[in-house]
Image (cartoon, grey):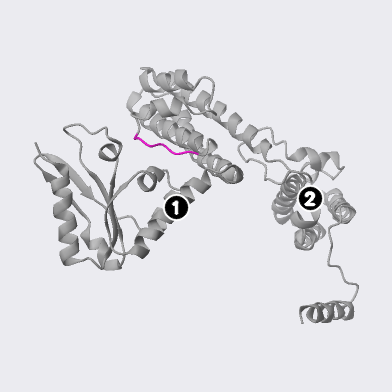
Amino acid sequence: MLNVFDVSDALVNHIRTHCSDDIAIIAYYGSYAQGTATKRSDLDFFFIPATSDGYRASIQFIVNDISFDFWPISWERAEKMALMEDSKTTIIADSCILYVRSDEDHTRFMKLREKINDMQDPKNGQHLTERAEALLHDVYVHLYKMRRNEESDSLTLFRIEAYEVLTKVLECLALLNQTFYTKGWGKNMDQIMRLPLKPARLEMLIDAIMTAKVASKVRQACEELVSDTLELVLNKKEIYTTSPSYPDRMLGYYEEVKGVLDKVVTACEKNDYSTAFYGAIGVQDQIAHFLYFAEKGHWPSTLDHTMVYLDLYKELGFPNLINLLNPDDLTPLQTAIENLDDLLESHLTNHEVKVNRFASLEEFKAFLRNKTDQLI
């Protein structure tokens, strides 16, 4: 029986002899690192190149019918793994080092492991929740493709899309729980089911996705799993809601958005409906987003179909520009935008947001001189 570590010794010795300056780290992960290897298990190598020439050491090969992949991971990708921006975090966290070029390389690698521990600190919960939300965005492409093919009875097509849904949702759940999977798909079910934060029907829905023999049932299980996971994401985001804070979150915003409002007013004056259409919808939605952020300290989810972020905009009595879009008469829209301009500036100044408004060029020059004096 092949001893895979004899293979690793041969590789490491080759590196030491021929390209020791070009390889920073050689390590292995997976079943041998975790003590779960079988007679057919390969040794899951990876290496971190130290130079561009180091990438040439990459090789895929088979010895005694066991396959091996000696593949490169850049320091940049290793950093993403440590920050849980790449789902293969376990490669850095749980690997066993076979070779290091220098003490500096070893220190750099161990600092990546420290970053993994730091990412699991509660202080990084909001960041990872936002990462989970971003990952969930990608899932909807696969739901869409299943919907577009709902008349098809091709189980193959639906299972391919369901695989993408399932793996992305499970990665999302790992991020929500500030952890990472230590084993590959199919071997990590125990860890998945031990996650503290997960859909109540997770096991049932996974089983339905994996075993259903009717395409429509696969799609339904996927949609329910995504819906349940989205609810968890939205609830987790609410945990990070903070007190309203306008002076820092909205500083400089009015000065920027006023230019957009003025463009829409100009479009109304010129009866330019196309420009008014895009401008009015875009600016109303943007203002609603920023008001939500100023109040809560996090951005609304684009996946939330209730569009709850619009509530504050309405409560403040800000005009609904979108309902006033009328290609035959833009006068009401123009009046509403001018009103919105006044209401927004008043709302921000009432919440102690400093607006840089100057009545004249001389006043602006005086402001610049004063600012320069303060820097000296």
Q: Amino acid at mark 2?
A: Ser
Q: Quadrant of the C terminus?
A: bottom right
* Disc 1 packing (10 Å; few <14; some 14–19; many ≥20): some
Q: Amino acid at mark 1?
A: Lys
Q: Which residue is mark 2?
A: 245
Name the element at disc 2.
Answer: loop
Magenta segment main secondary structure: loop
Q: CA distance from mark 2 to mark 1?
A: 31 Å
Q: Which residues are magenta?
A: 179-184
Q: Residue at x 40, y 60 (%)?
A: 108
Relative depth, front residue between 35 and 275: 35
Q: Position of residue 354 (x, y in %)?
A: 84, 62
Disc sitting over residue 292 in the figure: none
Task: Look at the picture and state if 180 lies above or below 369.
Answer: above
Q: Is residue 83 visible?
A: no
Q: Position of residue 51 (x, y in %)?
A: 30, 67
Q: Which residue is mark 1?
A: 80
Q: Is residue 49 visible?
A: yes
Task: Decide if residue 47 is on the left or right side of residue 371.
Answer: left
The image quadrant that residue 242 belongs to is: top right
